[in-house]
Image: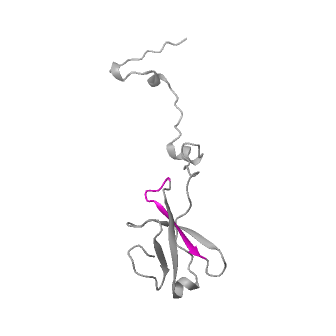
Amino acid sequence: MAKIVISIQNPSSFSEKSLTTTQMGRVIRAQRKGAAGSVFKAHTHHRKGPARFRSLDFGEQNGYLRGVVTDIVRDPGRGAPLARVTFRHPLRYKLQKELFVVAEGMYSGQYVYCGKKGLAFKINT
């Protein structure tokens, strides 16, 4: 049986890992993110919904539609609050509810005018 002699020049840098002859490669962070474990998933359960403008219809292209800010809500995962705006449906007897990003000075119960000929306030779209 052969005897192995190890000479250590700097004893502070000596560790058990330096004695191993073969080392496996490491699994890097991008590889761990690809497996999509619970640590790397976005927590989207309590989100309120996507914030977007109304779909452009005939009433918005040629005139305006009036909506009422019914509620201002906090959305987790987003820095700005959201406003629930309720519009009357242009064709049917029902309401359309949209989520807008709140502009500065918006309050619940406020009228918001969307469209080409909407009144020009600083928060209207």
Specify the quadrant that holds the C terminus.
bottom left
> Does residue 112 lie above or below 50 as drawn?
below
Q: Please tell me which residue lies in front, 3 or 17.
A: 17
Pick out the residue farthest to the bottom: 62
Pick out the residue farthest to the front: 109
> Does residue 49 lie above or below 40 as drawn?
below
Give the percent coordinates (x, y) of residue 98. Answer: 55, 68
Identified at 54% across, 33% down, the residue is: 24
Specify the quadrant that holds the N terminus.
top right
Identified at 40% across, 81% down, the residue is: 120
Q: Please tell me which residue lies in front, 122 or 37.
A: 122
Identified at 50% across, 56% down, the residue is: 75
Give the percent coordinates (x, y) of residue 81. Answer: 45, 59
Q: Colour scheme used in the picture? A: one colour
Q: With 114 as the anchor, is 45 left or right in this view?
A: right
Residues drawn in magenta: 76-88
> Does residue 56 lie above or below 21 as drawn?
below
Pick out the residue farthest to the right: 92
Residue 84 falls within the magenta-colored stretch: yes
Give the percent coordinates (x, y) of residue 7. Answer: 38, 17
Give the percent coordinates (x, y) of residue 14. Answer: 39, 21
Residue 86 falls within the magenta-colored stretch: yes
Query: On the image, which quarter does residue 56 sit in?
Result: bottom right
